[in-house]
Amino acid sequence: MPALTYDAVVEIRRQVGIGATDLETASHAYSLDELAQGVRETRGLLQAIADGWTQEQLLARPPLHTSDNAAEAGEDRWSATEAISHLIATQNWYLLHMGRLLGRREHFEKMVHGLGDLAEQDISKADLSEGLRAATDLFLATIASIPADADLTQKRSSTFFGDLSLRGWVLLSCVHDVDHLQQIQRVATLPTFPVG
């Protein structure tokens, strides 16, 4: 099976976007270990931003636009802090569904309730970095704890991406990470982006 690199996730996202595949089908090309490696890669790139950018850079937002262009609205106006805090909170949604597929009934203090939910700006660089590190460790530990005899065909609805198996939920997390990594990279190219 091919390695699930950042570039591979970007290509999967592109293929899903044009309707050439869906996340569940794409996830079948990878073992849980390979999907976990994809999480390590995407989260490592996010962690490098949380650790390497200054507080000012992490909080920088694109300037407001007066255009009606949908690409200039919503999440494309987020700072890196907002994008990363949203990814941390969204992880509970993946864990909830993965847990249900494993027969677990876990409850989470924070849970997203819609697109773009729980993007926070008032977080220190240290708290953002530690929060991402802890979330990543928990997610990787959860993937590693999936029993070898787990049913990888059972699925739960993801609302937006159809029914997903355990592998599909892990791939969704990688794709979601990549979406926000690309959004953060766009922020860093703006002429108003603070110099480190």
Image: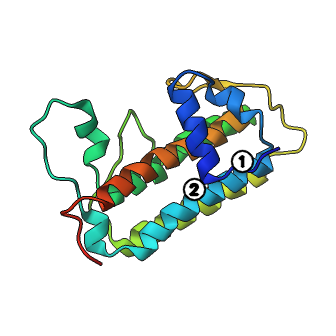
Q: Which residue is more in the foreground, 186 or 48?
A: 186
Q: Position of residue 154 (x, y in %)?
A: 76, 25
Say if 2 sits above or below 97 in the image. Answer: below
Q: Identify the residue at image location x=15%, y=29%.
A: 68
Res. 42 mark: 2
Q: Identify the residue at image location x=35%, y=41%.
A: 117
Q: Which residue is more in the foreground, 149 or 190?
A: 190
Q: Identify the residue at image location x=40%, y=70%.
A: 127
Q: Residue furthest left?
A: 66
> Is residue 59 toward the left or the right of residue 53 in the image?
left
Q: Where is residue 17 in the image (x, y as percent from the top left)?
A: 50, 28
> Is residue 182 toward the left or the right of residue 38 in the image?
left
Q: Where is residue 39 in the image (x, y as percent from the top left)?
A: 63, 53
Q: Identify the residue at image location x=62%, y=25%.
A: 22
Mark 2: give few (<14), some (14-19) or many (20+) Cα within 10 Å. Answer: many
Mark 1: give few (<14), some (14-19) or many (20+) Cα within 10 Å. Answer: many
- Inspect the image, locate mark 2, and give the three-letter code of the amino acid beneath it: Thr
- What scheme was used to colour the molecule? rainbow
Say if 133 sits above or below 76 in the image. Answer: below
Residue tagged 1 = 35
